[in-house]
Amino acid sequence: MEYMDYKKILRIIARAGSKLETVMIYYPRTNKQLKGWREVEPYSLSTDIGREGEHLIFNKDRISPGHIFNAYTINTSDDHCDSFIIGKIKSAKLTDRKFMPRNNWKVEF
């Protein structure tokens, strides 16, 4: 697998989010999941996790590898957004699969 530049990854995520489509991301191991590909619903970008995070606007705010990508991971039993550090996402690809936002969550792309 070829690792992608984070700016290219952000463009793919933003494109999917603006079309309400899922995206595949390759992410390292976490406490909940092994490393590998995950299909996610893209919701937003922010400066930090949780309520303290200021939401960022793609193509308006300066986004760095240390910022957070908020997304729901498909096929998980929980009902909350996961937070992914942008710089740790190794690759991304479009799925062309539509999704309906959960729990009235706002998609900010």
Image (tube, rainbow, N blue to C red):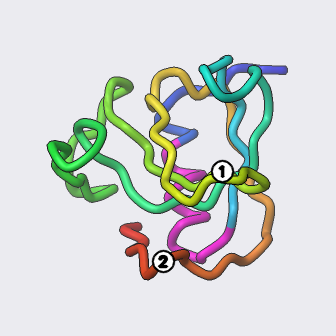
Percent of width and height locating residue 31: 60, 20
Q: Is residue 73 above or below residue 86?
A: below
Task: Tell me which corner region of the image, top left, top right, bottom left or bottom right, holds residue 30.
Answer: top right
Q: Earlier in the sequence, mark 1 or mark 2?
A: 1
Region in magenta = 10-21
Question: Which is nearer the eye, 84 or 80?
Answer: 80
Task: Tell me which corner region of the image, top left, top right, bottom left or bottom right, holds residue 97.
Answer: bottom right
Look at 56% across and 63% down and name the residue there: 15
Percent of width and height locating residue 55: 22, 54
Look at 33% across and 24% down and name the residue there: 66
Task: Please give the label number shown on residue 36.
Answer: none
Look at 23% across and 39% down and name the residue there: 47
Task: Please give the label number shown on residue 73.
Answer: 1
Q: Amino acid at mark 1?
A: Thr
Q: Secondary structure at mark 1?
A: strand
Q: Quick check: 80 left or right of 52?
A: right
Q: Secondary structure at mark 2?
A: helix
Main SS category, magenta section = helix
> How far apart are the alpha carbons under marks 1 and 2?
14 Å
Q: Quadrant of the C terminus?
A: bottom left
For discs 1 and 2, the disc positioned in front in the rendered view: 2
Q: Is residue 64 above or below residue 40?
A: above
Q: Is residue 89 above or below residue 69?
A: above
Task: Please give the label number shown on residue 103.
Answer: 2
Percent of width and height locating residue 29: 67, 17
- Asked if residue 68 lies in the magenta stretch, the reply is no
Q: Amino acid at mark 2?
A: Asn
